[in-house]
Amino acid sequence: MKNKKTIFLVGADTGGHVVPVFALAKDLALDEKYRVVVIGVGSTIEKRFYRKLSAVEYRTIVAGKFQFKSAWRNFIAVLKSGIGFFQSIGLIVKYHPKVIFLKGNYATVPVAYAARIFGIPIFAHESDAIIGKSNKLIAGFARKLFVSYPAEVFSHPGKNLEYSGAILRSEYQIKTFGPKNQAKKMPTVLILGGSQGAHAINEIIFSTLKELVSGYEIIHQTGVVDYKRSVEKKRELSKEIAGNYQPSAFIEDDFQAISKADLIISRASSSIFEFAAFRKAIILIPYPYASLDHQLANAKYFADRDAAIVLNEKDLSPTILYSAIAKILSSEKRKKELGQKLGKSVKLNGERIIRDELVKFLER
């Protein structure tokens, strides 16, 4: 261990931050010259992914998420981030990392400022079409801020901003596009609300479930909160169509589910890039309360390129959603066109670009 060069990879709390760090960690750990340490806050999805990496060390810190409407919560967040800052200093003193990569969210800030004290080079990545609050704080002293969208999308791109594209796991890498769909008796619709589900989308699906499963196979990631309800809704279906509904609190094999789908309904999160790797037709329903309206900005990017159908949650109804699904799946030409435009609208090899940049600093 003494001769190994250490890199910190920070990705915490949710799938959009954890999964890209998991991809980088898995790749970097293949080289025995490097000691890879991933840092998070101890969330369930962190444990689900990071514990798969036997050659990687997983450490946690405390960090606070700021809520602009709550002075008390902001005070608690300051205290937590202060603790996280000193924990980060402790980890740096213990491991002596040569370089640190941050998948920007609130948990990266304490590590970033601790690294700045020690003069350790840091790199960050932004998944969304709007630079988030944490990355805005970090960008001023980061060597590079990699972004998933072209630089011209951002209103005030800094000199250190570089368009790398998204960080995808190896199975999603460009030119693979996953296995081909097998012959099926009916089209498959995959519904994803993020790693924790999306209650508003779930309610719409439940309201039109009988109509949907009469013509389509529905794979539905509900999240933990709505999973029990989804099981109850399945019991209400007749035996002839109940088998067409496959609810799950969390889909472990998302690669297989995305590969199988003819159409995907999703929030406008970083998962879009995984769909792009498969060139799938998608319907995006941006989360209207996302920080800085970043999901609306993400959705607009793809809508402007005719690479996705976008529905606003406030206008959504069972009839509108069902009609949008039927319109796409009734036209093979339109379905294929949407998928092809999605695949061509973004870079999909960001993991390799960022890994190579990090390795340069490890080898200095």
Image (cartoon, rainbow, N blue to C red):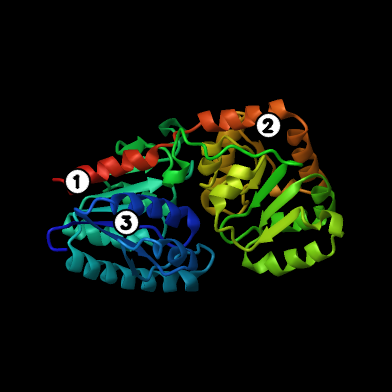
Q: Which mark is residue 335?
A: 2
Label 2, label 3: how many angstroms apart (C-alpha)? 38 Å
Residue denoted by label 1: 361
Q: Residue, x 43% and y 47% (percent of image)?
A: 169
Regarding mark 2 in the picture, which secondary structure is present there? helix
Residue 229 point in image, percent of width and height: 74, 67
* Quadrant the N terminus occupies: bottom left
Residue denoted by label 3: 9
Q: Earlier in the sequence, mark 2 or mark 3?
A: 3
- Relative depth, front residue between 361 and 34: 34
Mark in front: 1 vs 2? 2
223 sits to left or right of 111? right
210 sits to left or right of 151? right
Mark in front: 2 vs 3? 2
Judge whether 341 appears above or below 186 on screen: above
Q: Earlier in the sequence, mark 1 or mark 2?
A: 2
Judge whether 293 appears above or below 162 on screen: below
Q: Residue, x 80% and y 50% (percent of image)?
A: 213
**Amino acid type of the residue that numbered disc 3 sits on in the rendered structure:** Leu
**Amino acid type of the residue that numbered disc 1 sits on in the rendered structure:** Phe
Q: Are marks 2 and 3 in contact (CB under 8 Å)?
A: no
61 sits to left or right of 340? left
Q: Residue, x 62% and y 51% (percent of image)?
A: 287
Regarding mark 3 in the picture, which secondary structure is present there? strand
Q: Residues within 10 Å of mark 2 (few under 14, many from 20)?
A: some
Q: Quadrant of residue 305?
A: top right
